[in-house]
Amino acid sequence: MEAWNREAVPKVMKIVSTRLPQRDLISLLLVSPSIYRNLISHPSLWLVLDFHEMNKAGDRLIAALSLPRYHNVNHINLEFSHDLEDKHLEIVKNECGRSTGNLEVLNLNGCQKISDVGIDFITYNCPKLKVFSIYWNIRVSDVGVKYLVKNCKLVVDLNLSGCKNVTDESLKLIAENYQGLQLLNLTRCIKLTDRGLQTILLNCSSLQSLNLYALSSFTDKAYKKISHLVHLQFLDICGAQNLSDEGLSQIAKCKNLNSLNLTWCVRISDQGVMDIAQGCRFLEFLSLFGIVGVTDKSLEALSSFCSNTLTTLDVNGCIGIKRRSRDELLQLFPKLTCFKVHS
């Protein structure tokens, strides 16, 4: 029995603990000294710090990073956490730099008390950072992006959604420093112009996902350059009011595209959709919601080239399309499982 406890229990504990939430894992440390020693002996259990939606997140972060077991943390999630300010991140920089040297993923979504200087503090000792997300933060500006590209050279996934004060200067910095970027979210970054977007499209040719949701100021001059993204799989241009069939025909050259959101792209007609159907034959997701200029001709073209791949198709609000019932759509697209993206 003693031998079993010595050999089997640690193995069982490791298996079980890898499936536990962080809070439960920490609670286990208090059960007994032997369990404490066993859990601490597995560095792989202490690679993630998850404080999302927690109160006193700043104090919790500092306390955790001060513990030896978190000296190799590679993922920190502070999404919508409370009581996190620049002053906490300054302490992390000055006193816990050793613990963030291997950090690869940092989520600051909804942390609205963090400013540009806070980005400098938290990324200062993170040379291995690959994923950075700071959704919905109006305090962040081009200065914060400048700090990010200075401190972190390996970023491949960047989410600036809702950062309404970033401008084309940020896109220039991103294009110059992150040419291997694979995922970029610029949703509602309303100060951006064609010039900035073109800089990204001409320099970040490795992009696989590009989110331009709710950005109505771009024109075909920029949209046409999307054709340079030969690896692009996901594109959201919902609300692209200036996108024409001519611009869409260039997007159709992205032959690996499997998800395309054209919701409220009101200038689009059958010609643009037919170009997409012929060029993007791996489409799985397509929203044409609210486009009154498309007709059944668009569905016929899509059925000819994408019927074996499309699983989501939203044509609600497309009053020019008459064959819109579920049964009629299933006749054209037998693999459809989702008929409504927007409510």
Image (spheres, helix red, strand yellow):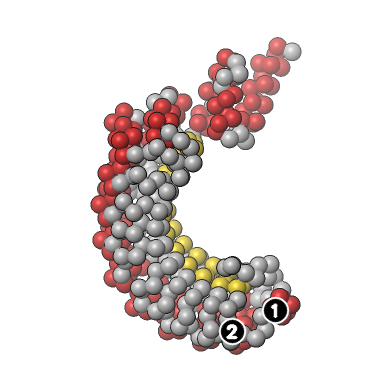
Residue 75 visible in the displayed image: no
Please name the amino acid that badge 2 sits on.
Ile
| Residue at 39% across, 69% down | 215
| Left or right position of 136 against 40 | left
Question: What residue is disc 1 on?
Answer: 325
Is 145 above or below relative to 5?
Answer: below
In three-dimensional space, the C-alpha distance between marks 1 and 2, rounded to whole angstroms, equals 12 Å
Question: What residue is disc 2 on?
Answer: 319
Choose the circle earlier in sequence order: 1 or 2: 2
Q: Position of residue 64 (x, y in %)?
A: 43, 28
| Residue at 34% across, 65% down | 190
Q: Looking at this view, name the residue that lies furthest to the top.
A: 2
- Viewer-nearest residue: 113 or 227: 113
- Viewer-nearest residue: 163 or 205: 163
| Left or right position of 30 against 212 | right
Please name the amino acid that badge 1 sits on.
Ser
| Left or right position of 177 against 212 | left
